[in-house]
């Protein structure tokens, strides 16, 4: 049992395997936060945690309760307007324009398991034996509004999932702000660790100490964005990969979000995670309900690697479509960087043939196969094959790929429309625009109004027809621009601020219908690389294109950042040609592959143009990856902090299997140096008692030795500088139980 309730003291203690989360109902009948951190024993009450000191600078609840000052209290889900001037968790506007709420606790219920949310991606415990859910009910008597706070406790993975619902039973109300999670912490001695960047340099780690005021990351792009990922952490200043206290937060949502951390005048910290209240409001009519998306929180006192592991475990069991959870992903070849849109069947077939010879398992046909799309000005929305490129139809081409024993995948960008398209000729009103305003193009394309049911239906019908016709195995669902001139032609004026959320609900509806109708099809989400890399997408599409940047060095930074909050099987990682398309860098194909092994491996280059020497290497890489695929995709991922890698020039990554009988460590050296120091690498996560060999050598090492003494990694010096510089090298060490 993970939820302990003391009814007399109205105290709730949510316990996971290693954490405790405690709150109680306060004198004003709202819930107040007491503790979140390492697990502590269950008691009847924790009076000491609720001790109040009177401060003379704040408002009090009533005249005879001078020490009940909301501004000083750690709250579960804070309102605004009663004397706590920190940013609130929610704000409602009532019929008369007032915004003050007085929700009072009504009661609670506990259920086994965790039901999926309707219309939103969510966590689940379908079997009902892994989770417990607590719903707390509050009522605002005056305005007849109910508020439910939901908590699901995933005991084994140390994860708590939160959300809230508002229902009106009288007149309509406006929900102006409804965050999914609030956490008030008693001090502010934390670093905020966020993952930010831009197109082609997504999710770079940034670590900054908290300071007085608000630090936040957010999006107003109606996408989680390249610029900031919704995942972030609060870590004690001494926390590193191996040790230290750290909270992790993430949001199961793909639209506008706000992660905000406020440090107040008394150095307490308020965390809020939810839909960005800017550009959002939701009208709840009498008898209706608004449900926030879910946010997750987790804690460990064992450092970043452990936090990543518990999240990885959690996603595979309770977020990823069970059809693909823990299921090995195919090695693919994608034609984008090989041909861009300049292809036809005759040009593609040799690539398919060669890829097949190399052992690659799936051919993915990227942008340009439909309508008359020879460049990015045209055809989005016209989801029928370009017969000039495929005389035998797309089904004819798919059959040829399938006949080789390979899987077949196709690129779609469902949410978009080109003005030069049949779809626009027929339905110009399906494109998002604001009346009497100019329309802003981006990549020469525009966005479909996914809030309209007929748009979602059109896309479902056309995509379904292609899926059936081609017996499709995989879809890359791209999204290459953000919305401008946001306006819902079918929404009344007082519902216009619902548009952003309704748009995302439309996207989710299409995903839900397609994944239900075609459960065997593997979806990979993409948004100009990693512009919508979030848990909302992952619920439907278990993997996402990590970044358009496939340079091996840049990918080290991107995948390293991504790995803090996501698991390797959740990102596609491809070997592409050199000089690299994004940075013009030359890196050896062995290094490109070594980086891409740590993810869902793919190739994205014209294999018909490579020298035999590189083709031989690819064949070996594919065979090596197949042999170790489970370990690379689902093994425990360690970012190694060791004495000799405390520099940006060397990165060590390792994956370890469940019984610790096998581990693969990669050492990436960015630049070579003259006459350098003797360099070792230190394995981690092995069994200290087990004996291991390295790369099949004769010498045996105990796990204790490999983890404490380390292993000497000779540098790579002998290279042909014209195409294989000695910079950017990678070493792979396979440790196997002897
Ligand atoms: C952006 C994606 O990230 C690329 O991989 C490719 O699919 C292009 N779009 C195609 O337009």
Image (cartoon, rainbow, N blue to C red):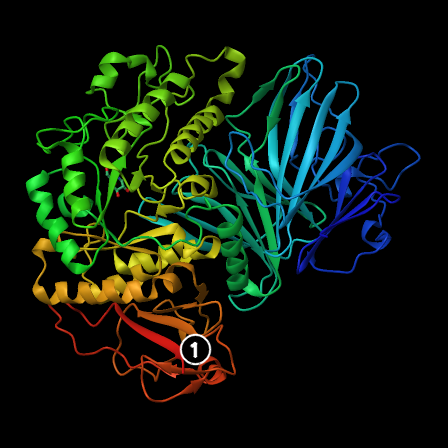
Residue toward you, 20 or 712: 20
State which quadrant residue 169 falls in.
Answer: top right
Q: Position of residue 46 (x, y in %)?
A: 83, 53
Q: Is residue 174 left or right of residue 315?
A: right
Residue toward you, 163 or 493: 163
Q: Secondary structure at mark 1?
A: loop
> Residue reaching furthest bottom?
699
Residue located at (78% from left, 60% from top): 41
Residue located at (93% from left, 35% from top): 64
Residues packed near mark 1 inside 10 Å, few (<14), some (14 to 19) or many (20 plus): many
Residue toward you, 229 or 16: 16
Q: Is residue 329 left or right of residue 709?
A: left
Q: Is residue 622 left or right of residue 288?
A: left
Q: Quadrant of the C terminus?
A: bottom left
Quadrant of the rendered image holding ligand 1: top left
Residue toward you, 352 or 543: 352
Q: Position of residue 162 (x, y in %)?
A: 62, 41
Q: Position of residue 674 (x, y in %)?
A: 25, 80
> Residue reaching furthest left?
346
Q: Is residue 161 visible?
A: yes
Residue located at (17% from left, 34% from top): 394
**Vertical position of residue 482 compared to residue 582: above or below:** above
Residue located at (66% from left, 26% from top): 166
Q: Is residue 135 left or right of residue 626?
A: right
Q: Is residue 588 visible?
A: no
Q: Which residue is mark 1?
A: 682
């Amino acid at each position: 049992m993970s939820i302990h309730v003391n009814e007399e003291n109205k105290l709730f203690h949510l316990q996971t395997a290693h954490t405790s989360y405690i709150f109680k109902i306060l004198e004003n009948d709202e819930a107040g936060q007491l503790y979140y951190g390492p697990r502590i024993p269950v008691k009847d009450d924790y009076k000491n945690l609720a001790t109040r000191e009177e401060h003379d600078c704040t408002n009090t609840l009533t005249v005879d309760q001078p020490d009940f000052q909301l501004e000083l209290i750690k709250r579960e889900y804070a309102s605004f307007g009663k004397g706590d001037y920190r940013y609130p968790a929610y704000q409602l506007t009532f019929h008369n324009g007032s915004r003050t709420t007085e929700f009072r606790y009504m009661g609670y219920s506990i259920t086994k398991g965790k039901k999926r949310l309707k219309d939103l991606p969510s966590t689940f415990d379908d079997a009902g034996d892994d989770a417990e859910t607590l719903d707390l009910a509050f009522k605002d008597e005056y305005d007849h509004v109910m508020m439910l706070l939901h908590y699901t406790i995933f005991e084994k993975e140390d994860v708590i999932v939160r959300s809230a619902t508002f229902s009106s039973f009288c007149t309509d109300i406006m929900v102006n702000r409804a965050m999914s999670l609030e956490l008030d912490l008693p001090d502010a001695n934390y670093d905020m660790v966020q993952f930010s960047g831009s197109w082609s340099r997504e999710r770079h780690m940034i670590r900054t100490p908290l300071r007085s005021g608000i630090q936040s990351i957010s999006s107003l792009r109606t996408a989680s964005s390249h610029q900031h990922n919704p995942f972030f952490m609060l870590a004690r200043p001494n926390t590193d990969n191996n040790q230290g206290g750290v909270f992790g937060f993430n949001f199961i949502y793909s639209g506008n979000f706000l992660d905000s951390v406020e440090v107040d005048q008394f150095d307490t910290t308020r965390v809020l995670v939810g839909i960005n209240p800017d550009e959002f409001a939701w009208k709840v009519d009498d008898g209706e309900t608004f449900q926030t998306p879910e946010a997750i929180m987790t804690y460990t006192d064992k450092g970043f690697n452990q936090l990543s592991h518990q999240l990885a475990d959690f996603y595979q069991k309770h977020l990823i479509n069970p059809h693909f959870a823990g299921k090995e992903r195919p090695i693919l070849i994608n034609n984008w960087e090989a041909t861009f849109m300049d292809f036809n069947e005759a040009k593609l077939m040799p690539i398919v043939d060669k890829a097949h010879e190399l052992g690659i398992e799936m051919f993915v046909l990227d942008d340009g196969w439909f309508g008359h799309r020879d460049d990015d000005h045209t055809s989005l929305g016209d989801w029928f094959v370009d017969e000039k490129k495929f005389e035998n139809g797309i089904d004819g081409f798919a059959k040829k790929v399938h006949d080789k024993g390979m899987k077949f995948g196709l690129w779609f960008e469902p949410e978009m429309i080109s003005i030069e398209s049949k779809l626009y000729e027929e339905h110009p009103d399906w494109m998002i625009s604001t009346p009497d305003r100019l329309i802003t193009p981006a990549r020469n394309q525009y966005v479909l109004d996914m809030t309209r049911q007929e748009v979602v239906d059109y896309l479902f019908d056309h995509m379904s027809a292609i899926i059936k016709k081609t017996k499709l195995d995989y879809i890359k669902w791209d999204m290459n621009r953000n919305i401008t001139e946001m306006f819902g032609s079918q929404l009344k004026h007082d519902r216009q601020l619902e548009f952003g959320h309704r748009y995302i609900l439309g996207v989710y509806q299409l995903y839900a219908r397609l994944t239900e109708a075609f459960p065997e099809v593997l979806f990979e989400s993409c948004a100009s690389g990693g512009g919508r890399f979030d848990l909302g997408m992952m619920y439907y599409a278990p993997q996402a294109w990590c970044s358009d940047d496939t340079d091996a060095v840049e990918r080290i930074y991107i995948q390293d950042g991504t790995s803090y909050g996501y698991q390797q099987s959740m990102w596609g990682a491809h070997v592409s040609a050199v000089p690299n398309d994004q940075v013009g860098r030359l890196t050896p194909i062995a290094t490109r592959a070594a980086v891409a092994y740590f993810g869902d491996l793919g190739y994205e280059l014209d294999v018909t143009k490579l020298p035999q020497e590189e083709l031989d290497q690819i064949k070996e890489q594919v065979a090596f990856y197949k042999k170790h695929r489970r370990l690379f995709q689902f093994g425990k991922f360690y970012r190694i902090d060791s004495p000799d890698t405390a520099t940006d020039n060397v990165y060590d990554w390792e994956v370890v299997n469940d019984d610790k009988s096998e581990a693969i460590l990669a050492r990436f050296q960015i630049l070579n140096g003259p006459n350098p120091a003797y360099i070792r690498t230190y394995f981690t996560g092995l069994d200290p008692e087990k004996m291991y060999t390295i790369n099949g050598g004769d010498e045996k090492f105990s796990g204790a030795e490999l983890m404490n003494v380390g292993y000497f990694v000779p540098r790579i010096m002998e290279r042909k500088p014209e195409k294989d510089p000695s910079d950017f090298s990678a070493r792979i060490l396979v440790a196997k139980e002897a």
